[in-house]
Amino acid sequence: MHFKINKTTLIDALNISTKAISNKTTLPILSGVLIEAQGNQLNIIGNDLNLGIETVVEANIFEEGAVVVDGSLFTTIINKLPNAIVDIHYTDHMVNIVCDDIKFDLVGTPADEYPEIPTIEKQNTYTFNSKLLKNMIKQTLFAVSTDEARPILTGVLFKIKNNNLTLVALDGYRLAYKQAAIEKLIENTAVIPGKTLNELNKILNDDSQLEISFTDKHILFNVDHVKIISRLLEGDFINYEQIIPSNFKSEMIIDTNEFRHAIERALLLSIKSNKSSIKFEIDKRHLTIKSNSETGKMEEELKIKYNGEGLKIGFNPTYILDVLKVIDSEKIKINFNNNMSPAIIKGLGDDQYKYMVLPVRLSE
Amino acid sequence: MHFKINKTTLIDALNISTKAISNKTTLPILSGVLIEAQGNQLNIIGNDLNLGIETVVEANIFEEGAVVVDGSLFTTIINKLPNAIVDIHYTDHMVNIVCDDIKFDLVGTPADEYPEIPTIEKQNTYTFNSKLLKNMIKQTLFAVSTDEARPILTGVLFKIKNNNLTLVALDGYRLAYKQAAIEKLIENTAVIPGKTLNELNKILNDDSQLEISFTDKHILFNVDHVKIISRLLEGDFINYEQIIPSNFKSEMIIDTNEFRHAIERALLLSIKSNKSSIKFEIDKRHLTIKSNSETGKMEEELKIKYNGEGLKIGFNPTYILDVLKVIDSEKIKINFNNNMSPAIIKGLGDDQYKYMVLPVRLSE
């Protein structure tokens, strides 16, 4: 294998594909990046068996071939080269890198030892607005579970039905739900691993060309010159529609930024003491946030609009803060029933997004 | 104790004084910050028994007094308050913080349990140009030893003699020496802990008012409204003048930036393999840098001017890179004798600074 390529083109591709490489891999070859030179293009591939990322770039190819090199070492070396043409030659188990008066020789592994990424035919293919999807992922992904004991909850439900795309994530304590109208497409449902969507959102720009293809077991995101291929999570997603309440006894409206800053302050004491609950005391015109720990206590009063009976209810402040970071509306609407039932948080006037959070029992 | 103060004034002072607080303290009260309200000013003090930092700010004091509160918690709380007047009241073992509609209560500890910072009388007091001293510290401090087995080497020698200020740091493998002409002052010699100078340099601005006072065991830096009081290291400093060679067989001149980038590349392989030596092959017009490890090898050729016989010599690349980061000259001069003797690195045309580095034995 022998090719020449511009340093910046190569480093951009490496920075994308190596995102699929896991630090914790038990299979040594998976810490490598696969480089395939074919025709007039390079395929640069990272893979952790669940997630593969393939970036295609043009290069001046003198001899076709393929090799696997240590992903992080190769990337840092290319990154430290001057902005010039890089000449890369694989021969005799060594990858020879030349740029100006600089030479590196790295150990290369034959490409046939590298696990193949599944080929996804372009059937069941959908085109999406990438800005819309990026925001939908941002508003739901944070609510996935990190507990591997229930794998299905580590993914986001991705449902296409009746001219709507719906994303849902939940972890047993809170649930994030986002819906958006799309053009009429064939119905489809999949549960996509959280890690895949996290990497996708790093690569996705607001104006990326985005195409998604499904098989029973895999999903392919085609983003400009990048292919992200991921396993889907197996099993049935939670029947979330049943657990979201639709009738409420009271409604609170509050300024998003003021609320966020107050929750951030309330969190300071619970971080220090590892205790994670705060109390909301709500009356007609005020929300009083109270936090209490070994190191001290905090109390803050915020102006609100409130419709309903006075309420005292406890929450994990992190679960409240998480949603305040992803709602764009200037005001927040929260619906309650009582201090044992879940609350629903929405941006005021936005019915496409809702966040359900369970209260915590108050100690007194 | 009861006072009001502007939030930004308070947070600026806390950010400075809490730098003296160690995370690893075994004495719980030392994780606190001491706040003393007296007359119309606050003294805000952090202390780890070796180093104390006291910041003085004006405040509106209603009741004099003093208290110790958890330094990091108090600082993060003040930091998260809105830009407004903060009202702080210590009573009944609680520090009550009020700002707008926000209230915090933190546990306070009586100030009499807090270890006293030594009082340094203003005798043996020197005034220095703070920009000059800041740069002198930058050029020497990095060479101190981190090995507590020889405490004297964890400090920087600070010598005032014959209209000169000299700073010297060494760790057994390399030595950094910086001299500057100053107005005639009384002779004095001290060894200042590296940590103290590190904190001093974070606080020092190019135009700070700087006054230094010595006692036998302590040093006081008066920087604007901040006092930094530090223990001095006890014992005699190494007789460094004897170990710096003054006659050389060869001299190399090289572009600082090109040299630095090449060393950074050479380091990439040694970081990965934990092996820390690179080889210089020097002839009349070229320096060839070679690095060799299990993961691969690297070779790079740089243009130089060289006076002397061809030389092959090995170095720890980190020790070379460290000095290239602090030399401002566009070109570097390196003097050698042979591959067993120390080399001297200087900025071309700058005789006030020199860096001595020992070679490593080449494996072949």
Image (cartoon, coloured by chain):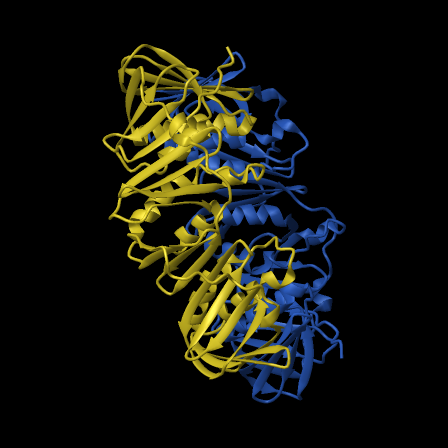
Chain colours: A yellow, B blue
Residue B116's place in the image compared with A221, above or below, is above
Q: Position of residue A89 (x, y in %)?
A: 54, 81
Please tell me which residue lies in front, B88 or A162. A162
- Does residue B78 appear in this view? no
Please tell me which residue lies in front, B349 or A134. A134
Residue B68's place in the image compared with A117, above or below, is above
Residue B238's place in the image compared with A131, above or below, is below
Could you tell me how many numbered marks the image carries?
Answer: 0
Residue B129's place in the image compared with A44, above or below, is above
- State the residue at coordinates (47%, 25%): A316
- Does residue B12 appear in this view? yes
Please tell me which residue lies in front, B117 or B9. B9
Q: Position of residue B95 (x, y in %)?
A: 49, 19
Q: Position of residue A146 (x, y in %)?
A: 53, 39
Q: Position of residue A115 (x, y in %)?
A: 58, 63
Please tell me which residue lies in front, B64 or A5. A5
- State the residue at coordinates (50%, 48%): B202
Residue A261's image quarter? top left
- State the residue at coordinates (37%, 31%): A355
